[in-house]
Amino acid sequence: MNDRLIELEIKAAYQEDLLQELNRIVSEQQQQITRLEATCKLLNDRIKSVSSEGVGTPQANDEVPPHY
């Protein structure tokens, strides 16, 4: 009976360590997701600003050559 109790305590200790490690990993992953979302938003904002700057301004390739 005593051996079974010791075995259960060992298993509980391992599970507690595993749970703490998993919590740490999930926390790190959430921080990484948050950083990636911020980066995506920044890139999206930059794309929008660049595309809005280019609207309405003729490009050199779009102009009609003078011989037409």
Image (cartoon, rainbow, N blue to C red):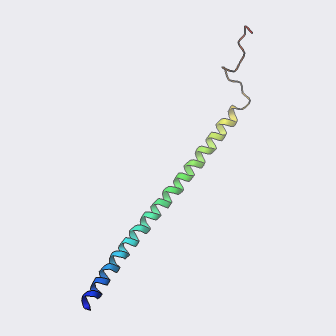
Quarter of the picture containing the N terminus is bottom left
Look at the picture and state if 57 lies above or below 17.
above
Left or right of 4 on screen, residue 38: right
* Residue at 41 percent of width and 67 percent of height: 22
Image quarter hosting the C terminus: top right
Residue 64 % position (x, y) = 72, 15
Q: Look at the picture and state if 10 lies above or below 31.
A: below
Q: Which residue of the protein is positioned furthest toward the bottom in this rendering?
A: 1
Q: Percent from the top left, x then y, of residue 16?
A: 37, 76
In the rendered image, the residue lying farthest to the top is 67
Quarter location, residue 18: bottom left
State how many labels appear: 0
- Using residue 2 as the reference point, say whether residue 38 is left or right of it: right
Query: Which residue is found at the position 67% from the left and 36% from the top?
Result: 51
Q: Position of residue 49 (x, y in %)?
A: 66, 39
- The residue located at (52%, 56%) in the rendering is 33
The residue most toward the left is 3
Image point (57%, 48%), residue name: 40
